[in-house]
Image: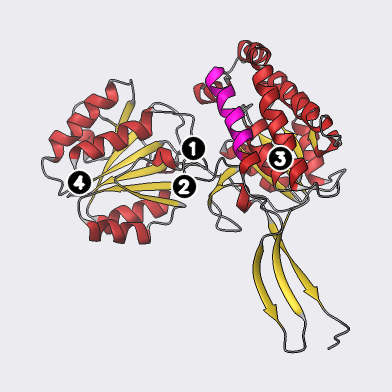
Amino acid sequence: MNTLLSIEKRNAVLRNMAKLLDQNREEIIAINKVDLEAYNGDDISMFDRLKVNDAKVDEMIAAAQHLALQQDPVGVERFSFEHENGLKIYNRTASFGTVLIIYESRPDVTVEAAGIAFKSGNNILLKGGKESLNSNKKIVSLWHEALKMEGVSTDWITYLEFDRSETQAFLENPTRQVDLIVPRGGERLIAFVKQHAQCPVIVSGRGNNFVYVHKDADWEIALQVIINGKTAKISACNAVDKVLIDKNLKDKTAFIQKLMTELQAFDVTILGDEQTSKLSGISPFENEAIWYQEFLDFKIVIGEVENVDAAVAKINTYSGGHSSVIVTKDEASAKGFMENVDTAAVYHNASTRFTDGGQFGLGGELAISTDKLHQRGPIGLQHLVTNKWYVYGNGQTR
């Protein structure tokens, strides 16, 4: 592990990276086109995450620039205590050491996630997917150039060009120190990492997010929240997959038909439970297990529930623990829902698409954790640290 770089050095590297991304914009997009043309899968969400265009490069640049402006997350005092014997005791944030990021498809992770981990004082190991190999290698070469410009070792950021079996072998018996692993991808990737890893793993779990349309919902808000959540970016873990309609919603059938019309305009496949599938245009699903599924596709399930308690119970049973929404004009019902739903983010009258480090004011994110330790929800710069106790004395013994 390298010695902790000064915050001035870390910030300078990030500023260099932003400039290099801009200077190499056309080459990055051209190299990414090679990856896009080579991709032969039929996963439309994977393809969407793989693509790099001018807007995506702008986002990478903005992430690096923003990180360079943020306060140093390392060495922040969280607790202090003076013992009666004169010992001065402090708890301060500290870097993990070496962070391994394993991810699929998204070249922007090579900038944003690596940048957050680097600014937090960590050595970075990157293991991207084969579908984005050329894009990732180009971006890592820019990281190395940014490091060299400050006379800093390129060992701070290393790209692991491993296949699946090599990755498994490394997880089970690392050839170098690894203190934390962050898998970013689908459920299969996360399960694979958890099964084989020998150190802590931050689980960026499945979405499978729910919107509950309460009996006192505003129709327009409900429609906006559902359509945006389902159609704005189907490859995102904060997309909506399930809609629960309160059985006592006024003009319920008319609302569902209006919702169906708007969803069908985006070619969304609509499935329903026993109650909602009686409506023309909604196909009944075949198995209750569908409530567990994250779609990452133009597909949605609409079901009916008795009341707030039933909605909470359904979400807590089936959701991925990511995000959930209640649409209602009743503040008391919203409060009860938000306090009792067991997801990392809970919303009242707003889209799940905001569950994102940048949108939450974190300036970016390493991942969105659906675990409850050590950080839940979007993991930003200030969360990618552990802590250390500093104790100062003058000969005290116990």
Q: Was residue 70 drawn as part of the magenta stretch in this picture?
A: no
Label 2 is placed on what type of residue?
A: His
Q: Residue furthest left?
A: 251
Q: Mark 1, residues whose alpha carbon is within 10 Å: few (<14), some, or many (≥20)?
A: many
Q: Position of residue 107 (x, y in %)?
A: 64, 26
Q: Earlier in the sequence, mark 1 or mark 3?
A: 3
Give the secondary structure at mark 3.
helix
In the structure shown, which secondary structural element does the residue marked by tag 1 occupy? loop
Q: Where residue 163 sits in the image (x, y, percent)?
A: 77, 29
Label 1 amino acid?
Answer: Cys
Chain-order first, disc 4 or disc 2? 4
Picture disc at residue 322 = 2
Tell me the crowding category of disc 4: few under 14, some 14 to 19, or many 20 or more residues within 10 angstroms, Cα based: many
The picture places residue 319, in percent across and down from the top left corner, at 43, 47
Q: Which residues are magenta?
A: 54-66
Residue position for label 4: 217
Asked whether the residues under the numbered discs 1 and 3 touch, taking CB atoms below 8 Å apart as contact, a structural biologist would say: no
* Relative side of 376 to 209, left or right: right
Q: Is residue 65 rendered to the left or right of residue 390?
A: left
Q: CA distance from mark 4 to mark 1?
A: 25 Å
Residue under pointer 3: 11
Disc 4 marks which amino acid? Answer: Ala
Amino acid type at circle 3 is Asn
Q: Earlier in the sequence, mark 3 or mark 4?
A: 3
Spatial distance from mark 4 to mark 2, Cα to Cα? Answer: 22 Å
Residue 128 in sight from this viewpoint: no
Q: Contact (CB < 8 A) between labels 1 and 2?
A: yes
Residue ID for mark 1? 237
Q: Earlier in the sequence, mark 2 or mark 3?
A: 3
